[in-house]
Image (cartoon, rainbow, N blue to C red):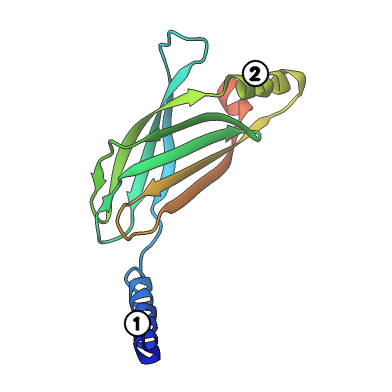
């Protein structure tokens, strides 16, 4: 291939990549919050949970979710994990709820509860991590939420 053709192909590729990078310049990351956690009946030793996520789409274009992978940690122990692919489209400038089924890590759960029983504490740190797959040329979105659950708010006065 002649050198001038290579340079032309390379220049075209650079322009295409630069053009794709500018397609979503005003795109704002959606927010994902845990709205509910509910235990489900289980036939196995490992419990399963239903997790409700509330997603806010602050963009004009609809959020067409092709898949989601998520995990929920308490005090650094990864307790709940799961994936889903049958998800609704969330319109632009709108909110939507997604219900997911999560399995537990039995060993991490046992370690977490043992640690919780051995220590005197007023709160538990939590962290939600979710990866939203929008499909096509759109980038995967990683969102996270960190916070604390105050045990005194849940159970009244602690030990």
Alpha carbons under labels 2 and 1: distance apart = 58 Å
Q: Position of residue 9 (x, y in %)?
A: 35, 82
Numbered-mark total: 2
Query: Which residue does the numbered mark 1 point to in the structure image?
Result: 9
Residue in the foreground of this view, choosing between 153 and 82: 82
Query: Which residue does the numbered mark 2 point to in the structure image?
Result: 110
Residue in view at x 38 percent, y 53 percent:
30
Against 58, residue 159 (above or below) is above
Circle 1 SS class: helix
Q: Is residue 158 visible?
A: no
Which one is in front in this view, the residue at disc 2 or the one at disc 1?
Answer: 1
Q: Position of residue 112 (x, y in %)?
A: 66, 24
Q: Earlier in the sequence, mark 2 or mark 1?
A: 1
Against 17, residue 138 (above or below) is above
Image quarter (top left, top right, bottom left or bottom right) of the C terminus: top right
Residue in view at x 25 percent, y 41 percent:
88
- The 10 Å Cα crowd at callout 1, few under 14, some 14 to 19, many 20 or more, is few
Q: Quadrant of residue 53?
A: top left
Q: Badges 2 and 1: C-beta atoms under 8 Å apart?
A: no
Residue sticking out furthest to the front: 1
Image quarter (top left, top right, bottom left or bottom right) of the N terminus: bottom left
Q: Is residue 11 visible?
A: yes
Q: Quadrant of residue 35?
A: top left
Q: Position of residue 149 (x, y in %)?
A: 58, 33
| Residue 127 disc label | none
Q: Quadrant of residue 4?
A: bottom left
Q: Position of residue 18 (x, y in %)?
A: 38, 77
Residue in the foreground of this view, choosing between 33 and 45: 45
Residue sticking out furthest to the bottom: 4
Left or right of residue 11, residue 127 in this image: right
- The 10 Å Cα crowd at callout 2, few under 14, some 14 to 19, many 20 or more, is few
């Amino acid at each position: 291939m002649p050198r001038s053709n290579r340079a032309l192909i390379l220049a075209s590729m650079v322009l295409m990549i630069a053009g794709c990078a500018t397609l979503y310049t005003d795109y704002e990351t959606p927010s994902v919050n845990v709205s509910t956690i509910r235990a489900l009946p289980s036939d196995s030793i490992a419990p399963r949970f239903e997790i409700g996520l509330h997603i806010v789409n602050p963009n004009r274009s609809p959020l067409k979710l092709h898949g989601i992978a998520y995990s929920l940690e308490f005090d650094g122990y990864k307790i709940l994990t799961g994936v889903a692919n049958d998800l609704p489209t969330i319109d632009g400038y709108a909110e939507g709820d997604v219900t997911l089924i999560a399995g537990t890590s039995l060993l991490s759960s046992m370690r977490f509860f043992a640690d919780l029983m051995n220590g005197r504490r007023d709160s538990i740190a939590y962290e939600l991590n979710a990866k939203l797959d929008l499909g096509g040329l759109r980038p995967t979105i990683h969102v996270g939420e960190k916070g604390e659950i105050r045990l005194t708010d849940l159970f009244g006065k602690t030990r």
